[in-house]
Image (cartoon, rainbow, N blue to C red):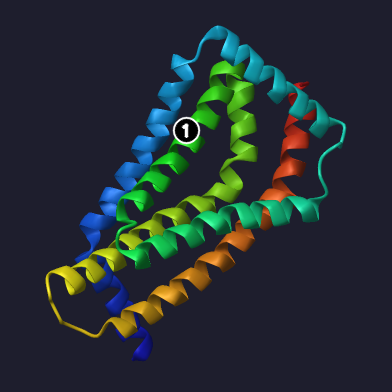
Amino acid sequence: MKKRLYQNDVASYFREHSSIFLFVVILFLMGVIFGAIVVNSMSFTQKEDLFYYLSQFFGQISTGKTADNNDLFMQSFFHNSKFIGLIWILGVSIIGLPVILIILFIKGMVVGFTVGFLVSQMGLKGFMLAFVSILPQNLIIIPVFILMASFSVIFSLRMIRRQFLKKIGEPIYPFFKRYIITLVAAFILISAASGIEAYLSPWLMESVITSIGL
């Protein structure tokens, strides 16, 4: 019975704020599209310079000269946790609402640019590299970013209504408690994604690079 009530509460919550979740998803997708457009707007020299450094990186992977897996894990975890934590804090600060949306848009732009550049420069080989190097961990990271941004926007709007519109409504503490739980869950998921990025993605990339002869 409790499980069913919890599922109903969750479903009700998502229905109530469906417009916010939809807006955040669309904003992220716009960032991805914009990132891909930026690739096409780069000059030939810029693309050649960037591709040179990328080729050097692929060469290091093919020869096994990459950072230690544990170091990669820590770098990935702290990098993503830093932005997740910032989004969470901005949701509490009220005035950080626009910055949350900017961070999410930039995240989408980085993904779109990376995939777009690999595909534009290397065609099918670039798509294969993007598939094994970007997709695995981002299957977790992207939903976490989108959900955290959505929850932060919702919490920020609730705080704004409470502070400036003088709407008392329900106590803020239960919502803040759930907001903290959301952050903890996000960190757990980010650690899982970092594990994939550190231990699985390099092996997949090395296999693909060897098979396609880079």
User: Residue 26 at x, y = what percent?
Assistant: 30, 43
> Splitting the image into 4 quarters, where does residue 195 fall?
bottom right
121, above or below 24, in the image: above
Q: Residue drawn 60% across and 33% down?
A: 130
User: Residue 3 at x, y = what percent?
Assistant: 38, 85
Where does the N terminus fall, quadrant-wise?
A: bottom left
Mark 1 Cα shell of 10 Å, populated few (<14), some (14-19), many (≥20):
many
Which residue carries the number 1 mark? 112
Q: Residue drawn 56% across and 63% down?
A: 189
Would residue 211 be visible to someone looking at this image?
Answer: no
Q: Nearer the viewer, residue 98 or 213?
A: 98
Q: Is residue 105 left or right of residue 43?
A: left
Question: Circle 1 — which element?
Answer: helix
Q: Residue drawn 44% across and 29% down?
A: 35
> Splitting the image into 4 quarters, where does residue 49 fall?
top right
Q: Residue drawn 55% across and 31% down?
A: 114
159, above or below 21, in the image: below
> Splitting the image into 4 quarters, where does residue 201 fall?
top right
Type of amino acid at the residue the image marks with label 1? Gly
40, above or below 82, in the image: above
Q: Nearer the viewer, residue 41 or 62?
A: 41
Count the labels in the image.
1
Where does the C terminus fall, quadrant-wise?
A: top right
User: Residue 73 at x, y = what percent?
Assistant: 72, 55
User: Residue 29 at x, y = what percent?
Assistant: 36, 39
Would residue 214 be visible to someone looking at this image?
Answer: yes
Q: Residue furthest top?
A: 44
